[in-house]
Amino acid sequence: MTRVAPTNDARPTGDASRAIGRRPHLPALDGLRGVAIIGVLLFHTGHLSGGFLGVDLFFALSGHLITGLLLREVEATGTVSPVAFWGRRIRRLLPALAAMLAGVTVLVRAVGPPDLVRTTRADGPWVQLNLVNWHLLAESASYWDRFGAARVFEHLWSIAVEEQFYLVWPVLLLLTARGGGRAGHRVAVTAAVGSAVSLVLMVALADPADPTRVYTGTDTRAFSLLLGAMVATPPLRAVLARVAGRGAGAASVSLAAGLGVAWWLVDGVDSPALFTGGLFVHSLASALLVGLCAQAPRTPVARVLARPPLRWLGLISYGLYLWHWPVFVLLSPQRTGLGGWTRTALVCAVSIGLAALSKYLVEDPIRFRAGWARGRSGAVAFAAVMAGLAVLWWALPVPAPPTVDLTNLR
């Protein structure tokens, strides 16, 4: 149902990284991604009612990492280059997404039922444009009711929310940070005000009968990303540094325990308090836990999160998020004859395998080693990929909708 998207750390490459400087890698943050994707997987297989909250953890982590990167750029250069930032994001996110979109679309056309082929064709262009959350809202169907085998791309609503944030936030930060001085403080205030406005919109627009609009709308979910951004600013980092000097271990344990209890008890349909402040509190707790793990990487919680299995899941979490829901839909109980934990084990194993292939064969080579993916040749490659996907949607044969013979009706 849900992703943030779960992207790996957004570090600049090449000349940009040398100018800005790289922050030491924090294994605990990879582990947090691993925990978040486990929650989503268990939710989608029916084993953890609040596992969808892992998306909020992804959002908070993404907002924190992106803002930290941009603030380091401001410190090093006095400004922000949105174009360079967007280029890094495209190299990081588009290759795996394009591969998944093309592969799943072809597979659905080959083996999927007609209804699935039609929804795949209808949703694909909106995924490509990073607007699928608004496309799904425009259809006026309940998110919680419709999340089933009818769509293979519906989980990508959260990636659309993140991409829209990536488009706007660097520009806002550029404008906010102008003039030097206390740029970090101004960014903190901007993030705090934006979070408050987003919360007010969620409360005002929430429909107890159907929370779809406020759950998947970019405006009403922005606080999850902005709270992570706020915790990455110098004023909040200073506060967390003081906490880390006194009680970081206890604070981290309390936050982690609170998130765990929420994931265990919360139900998205029967928890209306989520949409009148509950999600905000959960996102704030997630952002604070991210900040504490960054400030105090030797606490017991951070050391557990840095364990190799969780770290590795975190490193493949983007591909795992992309692939897991199409796998769940295509390997349905009807198709496999399996259910319960047996089917869970199968779909998770297949999803993890595809995510690992995505990371090692697609994501990392293009992100770290493909010189052609930068500069003018990178722009040409981007245009070619976007054109290729557009041709795929245009050329995909779509079954005709079912017809009803009215001649036999009396």
Image (cartoon, rainbow, N blue to C red):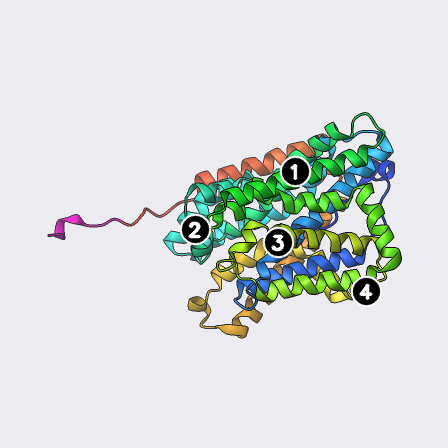
Distance Cα–Cα, label 1 vs label 2:
27 Å
Res. 303 mark: 4
Tag 3 near tag 1, CB within 8 Å:
no
| Residue 301 percent location from the top left of the image | 78, 64
In the image, residue 217 above or below residue 112:
above
Residue type at tag 1 = Gly
Q: Secondary structure at mark 2?
A: loop
Q: Is residue 407 magenta?
A: yes
* Magenta region, residue range: 403-410
Label 3 crowd bin: few (<14), some (14–19), many (20+), radius 10 Å: many
Q: Main secondary structure of the magenta part?
A: loop
Three-letter residue code for mark 3: Val
Q: Which residue is mark 3?
A: 55
User: For the residues carrying marks 1 and 2, which lies nearer the camera in this image?
Assistant: 1
Instruction: Check disc 2 and give the amino acid type.
Output: Ser
Query: Disc 2 or 3, which lies upstream in sequence?
Result: 3
Residue at (68% x, 49% y) in the render: 60
* Mark 1 / mark 4, whichever is N-terminal: 1
Name the element at disc 1.
Answer: helix
Residue receiving disc 1: 194
Q: Is residue 255 magenta?
A: no
Which mark lies nearer to you, 3 or 1? 1
Residue 211 drawn at (x, y percent): 48, 50
| Residue farthest top in this picture | 179
Taking the view exactly as shown, the residue that stands out farthest to the left is 410
Q: CA distance from mark 3 to mark 1?
A: 19 Å
The residue identified by callout 2 is 142
Query: Alpha carbon of mark 4 to alpha carbon of mark 3: how far?
Result: 22 Å
